[in-house]
Image (cartoon, rainbow, N blue to C red):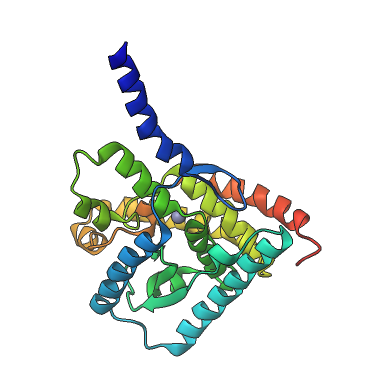
């Protein structure tokens, strides 16, 4: 009896911090597990981010940089606007966004880190048909940040793997090189649609971007038998297409959301 009590006590002690650590994702209101303090994640992210910038060349093309930067500013403005419209507390989400474009013409990539640093590759900027599509990626990536997806991933990882993994490995992962889960991807898509719409961009272009990317991926698959191309594809970083998996109905879903969101916020756009 005493032993049972002891185990119960132990179980509650173990569970308590997890219950207390459930947070709500703004916009979607999903409950998520978050065991990681913001300061901690940002501190580690900063270290990786500045190391990353040291190892990669930034673009010299200021027109391209300014174009991406301005779109980033508009999306940040839209995030703030969303919080105001919904009467939500923005103080914790007033993040120190930084946008960079690396001069990589071969890898189709973009990512955001938990410290609100967003990196676009030249290749993905050139791949986009228009500003609306760049805004779609920007909104999606900032959506991952606002929804604290990296905190959530590390929290899950810590919960299950702390006994078998070295902390250093968890640090190193930080989420940004691994494929996102479908749930997180879908949530970032939705947040992206909301933010780009409020910033005045056409959310249907987000669906068009994913369709174009799907077409591109199919083309790459066709050429996979060509060893020269495989060398080009296998770089240090995975491509956007491998960190962002393709649920079949992705662009269909975005089109539906685009309609709903445009309707919901018609007085603000
Ligand atoms: Zn994503």
Residue farthest toward the front in the current orientation of the protein: 2
Q: Quadrant of the N terminus?
A: top left
* Residue at 48% across, 61% down: 141
In-front residue for pair 119/5: 5
* Residue at 31% across, 21% down: 7
Q: Quadrant of the C terminus?
A: bottom right
In-front residue for pair 56/256: 56
Marker count (numbered): 0
In-front residue for pair 208/83: 83
Against 234, residue 10 (above or below) is above
> Where residue 226 appears, x then y in whole percent?
22, 56
> Where residue 38 appears, x then y in whole percent?
42, 60
Q: Is residue 244 visible?
A: no
Classify residue 71 by image quadrant. Answer: bottom right
Q: Is residue 234 visible?
A: yes
In-front residue for pair 86/226: 86
Against 12, residue 232 (above or below) is below
Horizontal arrangement in the rendering, residue 225 relative to residue 256 (left or right): left
> Where residue 82 appears, x then y in whole percent?
67, 62
Residue farthest toward the right in the current orientation of the protein: 267
Horizontal arrangement in the rendering, residue 140 relative to residue 112 (left or right): right
* Residue at 32% across, 39% down: 159
> Where residue 189 appears, x then y in whole percent?
55, 53
- Specify the quarter for ligand 1: bottom left
Horizontal arrangement in the rendering, residue 104 relative to residue 134 (left or right): left
């Amino acid at each position: 009896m005493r032993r049972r009590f002891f185990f119960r006590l132990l179980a509650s002690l173990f569970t308590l911090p997890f219950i207390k650590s459930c947070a709500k994702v703004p916009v979607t209101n999903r409950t998520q597990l978050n065991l990681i303090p913001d300061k901690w994640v940002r501190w580690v992210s900063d270290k990786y981010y500045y190391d990353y910038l040291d190892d990669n060349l930034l673009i010299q093309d200021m027109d391209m940089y300014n174009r991406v930067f301005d779109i980033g500013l508009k999306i940040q403005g839209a995030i703030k606007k969303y919080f105001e419209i919904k009467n939500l507390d923005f103080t914790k989400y007033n993040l120190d966004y930084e946008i960079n474009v690396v001069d990589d013409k071969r890898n189709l990539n973009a990512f955001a880190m938990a410290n609100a640093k967003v990196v676009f590759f030249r290749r993905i900027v050139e791949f986009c048909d228009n500003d609306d599509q760049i805004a779609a990626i920007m909104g999606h990536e900032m959506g991952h940040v606002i929804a604290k997806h990296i905190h959530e991933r590390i929290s899950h990882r810590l919960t299950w793997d702390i006994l078998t993994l070295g902390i250093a490995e968890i640090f190193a992962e930080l989420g940004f090189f691994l494929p996102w889960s479908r749930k997180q991807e879908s949530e970032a898509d939705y947040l992206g649609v909301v933010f780009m719409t409020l910033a005045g961009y056409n959310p249907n272009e987000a669906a068009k971007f994913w369709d174009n990317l799907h077409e591109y991926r199919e083309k790459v698959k066709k050429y996979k038998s060509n060893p020269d191309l495989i060398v080009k594809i296998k770089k240090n970083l995975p491509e956007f297409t491998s960190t962002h998996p393709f649920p079949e109905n992705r662009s269909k879903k975005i089109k539906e959301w685009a309609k709903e969101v445009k309707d919901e916020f018609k007085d603000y756009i």
